[in-house]
Amino acid sequence: MFILFVLISLIVPNAYGQNYDDKYFRIKKVKRSVAVKEEASFTPSTIKIVEELLPLQSETEETDPLAIIETFTKVWQIIEDNQPVVRNDTDKFANALPAISQINWSAVGGWQPERNVTVTIVYTNYYGMEVIRLQYQVKVVYGGNVRGKGLYIASAKIIPTQISVAWGYTLNVVASAPLVLNARTPQDPLAVIYLNLNYVVSTIVKTDSVTDTYQVQGDGLMKNTKSNRLLFPAVLKFH
């Protein structure tokens, strides 16, 4: 730590003044890795999510019990000024449920164990120093149906799992679910949620903004739509 302090003192003598070294504040390399995992059984966080959906019930009868509804916030902050905002695995999530779940949650069954994608992003400057490390997970609980009709999503979320930010750098991360739709018919819906993760890395020299985009489906499919990479194939079939 002492060596790092001396180095920074030499290259940035006036803090945010005019004397600085571009090599410290400029990014030379960004490394990205992706790991996928499918739970063998329901995790405690998955069970808690399903249980917490119960208070969302309404007394309003829907004309179409299979219609896809949303009961979540469209945009939520994940990291603000290098600090995590979402701290709980069940804190913020998107969903796509059948309308009948609002008045009778027990009518929906068939939920599958969670599918999990872990993404690690590492920024290195021109001194070879790791200045940003961001690791996040995309988690989906899928497969719910109403007496064999439809395939729905109980939870689709993005959470930070590791954050490391060097002096002079600022990291902000925002997640959003801009689009929820039915990819099949009204009589047998297939819920699809599009998730965006926007992360912004800022220094006194430059600000970089990157958005990762994901498509998750009620049949288990998970895809990075930006790279067109299939992360998990669809596994559930319609009756």
Image (cartoon, helix red, strand yellow):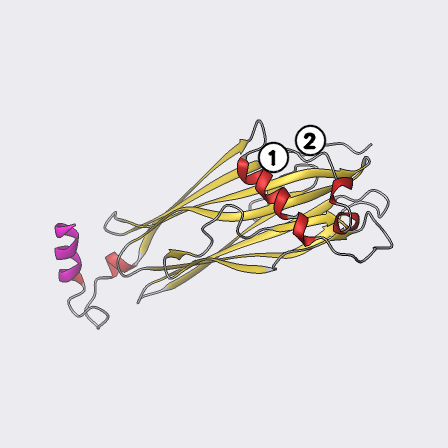
From the viewer's perspective, tell me whether residue 77 is left or right of residue 140.
left
Mark number displayed over residue 235:
2
Q: Main secondary structure of the magenta part?
A: helix
**Depth check, front residue: 185 or 96:** 96
Query: Is residue 20 on the magenta stretch?
Result: no
Q: Is residue 27 above or below residue 216?
A: below
Element on which disc 1 rests: strand
Element on which disc 2 rests: loop
**Depth check, front residue: 149 or 14:** 149
Which x, y percent locates residue 71? 67, 55
Amino acid at pointer 2:
Val
Q: Residue at x 72, y 39 (%)?
A: 144
Mark 2 is surrounded, within 10 Å at the Cα level, by few (under 14), some (14 to 19) or many (20 or more) other residues, namely few
Mark number displayed over residue 232:
1
Which x, y percent locates residue 98? 76, 47
Report if residue 225 is visible in the image.
Answer: no
From the viewer's perspective, tell me whether residue 132 is left or right of residue 40.
left
Q: Which residues are magenta?
A: 1-10
Q: Residue at x 62, y 51 (%)?
A: 94
From the viewer's perspective, tell me whether residue 65 is left or right of residue 209.
right
Viewport quadrant of the C terminus: top right
Pointers 2 and 1 in contact (C-beta within 8 Å): yes
Q: Quadrant of residue 10?
A: bottom left
Mark 1 is surrounded, within 10 Å at the Cα level, by few (under 14), some (14 to 19) or many (20 or more) other residues, namely some
Query: Is residue 9 on the magenta stretch?
Result: yes
Q: Residue furthest bottom?
A: 17
Q: Residue at x 58, y 42 (%)?
A: 48
Which x, y percent locates residue 212? 52, 51
**Depth check, front residue: 61 or 36:** 61
Q: Residue at x 75, y 51 (%)?
A: 102
Which x, y percent locates residue 35? 48, 35
